[in-house]
Image: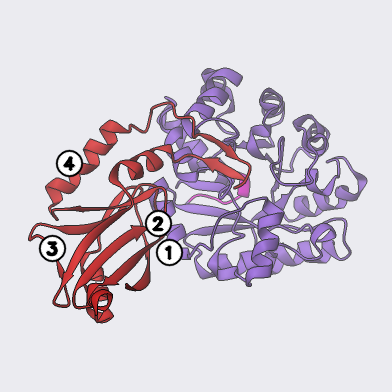
């Protein structure tokens, strides 16, 4: 099963709420000149990319926008509408009231598969005391967390809060908490390699296409920043395919993975098996 | 000269795709009431084109292979970068170049209320960066109203 672990459904037809919200979602993601995507169009894109399932991320930074840009209910609605296509990740804003209840609700009632957070936007370090309870709830509920990591192309984000090394203490303090670091933690790609090497509970996603085309950028990451053998021999159980769609080129990134010369086993892990493990979903 | 403009939307479902839109153009012409005039079919995009050719599977394949040879996916293009205005990566230089080669429009005559075209001529909308939502417009010019 080929899974994209990192997709923003902000512009999906099923959750469209009109022009004002569309504009707010554009502002929130810093994505422009785009349009509403029908589910049929999403399916067409998936088919072209060879993808079987997408993991849709809610986006709750209510302390900044006054409301979730994509609510947990909206993500759950999309998943329920097409469970054969989608997994769903919750989002809560720990700087607002009632986030604990919302998180329990997202996990226990909406059955979302994990939590998504962009701390460079909330301007919180991963070690911030206000996040400890959040980690505990994810552990209690056996749910992973996907953290935005490294460069964020969203407005009003500060990279120091999402530097990979800031996550080491969390990985070390909560060895059973499954932590996904997005974007390879670019530009601190070697730092994420170090974290994966030291901590089996740290995963990264491949949602990085900051320069060049998909194949060129993946070659740079996998053969210049990393040695190809680092992945093939040591890190292949902790890398998940992610595209950050609609930011990056989902179809071309999916195809580029096949051009890097990895073994079939490594590709199977990166394309889906690691994501299933990360989400705690048993195969078969 | 009297003009009518009709917008048509299609959803393509492949990366490159030749969509034969001749019937749709004929229907627009028929319902326009124009008896003698000219129709222009115009793509509203920079990575999709309009072309006229014979509607044969073999030719469709030859055209696709010819364009791919001229504009290979693997060449090092400048249009491969994050675009600040979009907030997303440009990965479609081949689409722009192929669309430029094919062109963005075609003209055909209307005679006695029907589309006047050669027996081998079919109108194609050519997708070069799909799947996507696409719009083309059909511009009808009425010669009779010009001269009456």
Residues tagged by mark 4 and mark 3 found on one chain of the structure: yes
Which chain is tinted purple?
A
- Check disc 4: other Cα within 10 Å, few if <14, some if 14-19, many if 20+: few
Q: Please give the name of the residue rendered at 37% of the width and 71% of the height, measured from the top-left corner.
A: B5
Q: Position of residue A159 (x, y in %)?
A: 78, 36
C-alpha distance separating marks 1 and 2: 6 Å
- In front here: A226 or B80? B80
Classify mark 2: helix, strand or loop.
Answer: helix
C-alpha distance separating marks 2 and 4: 24 Å
Q: Position of residue B60 (x, y in %)?
A: 18, 48
Mark number displayed over residue A40? 1
Q: Chain of mark 3?
A: B
Residues tagged 1 and 2 counted as in contact (Cβ below 8 A): yes
Residues tagged by mark 4 and mark 1 found on one chain of the structure: no
The nearer-to-camera label among 2 and 4 is 4
The span picked out in magenta is A278-283
Residue A279 magenta:
yes
Q: Which residue is mark 2?
A: A44
The nearer-to-camera label among 3 and 1 is 3
Mark number displayed over residue B117? 3
Say whether disc 4 or disc 3 marks the residue closer to the N-terminus: 4
Classify mark 1: helix, strand or loop.
Answer: helix
Which chain is tinted red?
B
């Amino acid at each position: 099963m080929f899974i994209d672990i990192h997709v923003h459904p902000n512009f999906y037809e099923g959750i469209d709420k009109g022009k004002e919200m569309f504009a707010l979602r554009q502002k929130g993601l810093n994505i422009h000149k785009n349009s509403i995507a029908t589910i049929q169009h999403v399916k067409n894109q998936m088919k072209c990319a060879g993808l079987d399932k997408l993991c849709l991320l809610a986006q709750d930074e209510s302390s900044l926008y006054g409301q979730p840009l994509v609510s947990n209910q909206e993500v759950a609605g999309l998943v329920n509408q097409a469970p054969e296509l989608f997994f769903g990740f919750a989002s809560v804003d720990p700087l607002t009231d009632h986030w604990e209840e919302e998180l329990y609700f997202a996990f226990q009632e909406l059955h979302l598969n994990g939590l998504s957070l962009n701390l460079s936007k909330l301007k919180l370090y991963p070690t911030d005391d206000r996040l400890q309870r959040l980690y505990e709830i994810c552990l209690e509920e056996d749910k992973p967390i996907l953290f935005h990591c490294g460069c964020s192309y969203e407005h009003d984000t500060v990279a120091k809060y999402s530097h990979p090394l800031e996550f080491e203490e969390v990985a070390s303090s909560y060895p059973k908490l499954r932590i996904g670091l997005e974007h390879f933690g670019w530009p601190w790609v070697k730092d994420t390699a170090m974290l994966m090497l030291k901590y089996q509970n740290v995963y990264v996603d491949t949602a990085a296409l900051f320069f060049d085309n998909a194949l060129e950028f993946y070659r740079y990451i996998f053969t210049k920043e990393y040695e190809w053998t680092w992945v093939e021999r040591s890190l292949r159980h902790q890398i998940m395919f992610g595209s950050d769609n609609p930011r990056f080129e989902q179809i071309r990134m999916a195809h580029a993975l096949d051009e890097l010369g990895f073994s079939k086993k490594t590709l199977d892990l990166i394309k889906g098996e690691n994501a299933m493990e990360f989400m705690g979903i048993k195969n078969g | 000269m009297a003009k009518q403009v009709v917008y048509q939307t299609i959803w393509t479902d492949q990366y490159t795709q030749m969509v034969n839109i001749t019937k749709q153009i004929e229907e627009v012409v028929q319902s326009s009431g124009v008896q003698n005039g000219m129709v222009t079919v115009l793509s509203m995009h920079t990575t999709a084109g309009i072309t006229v050719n014979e509607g044969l599977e073999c030719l469709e394949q030859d055209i696709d292979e010819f364009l791919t040879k001229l504009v290979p996916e693997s060449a090092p293009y400048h249009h491969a970068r994050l675009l600040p205005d979009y907030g997303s990566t440009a990965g479609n230089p081949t689409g722009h170049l192929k669309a430029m080669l094919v062109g963005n429009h075609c003209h055909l005559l209307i005679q006695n209320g029907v589309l006047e075209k050669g027996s081998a001529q079919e109108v194609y909308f050519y997708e070069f960066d799909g799947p996507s939502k696409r719009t083309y417009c059909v511009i009808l010019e009425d010669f009779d109203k010009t001269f009456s």
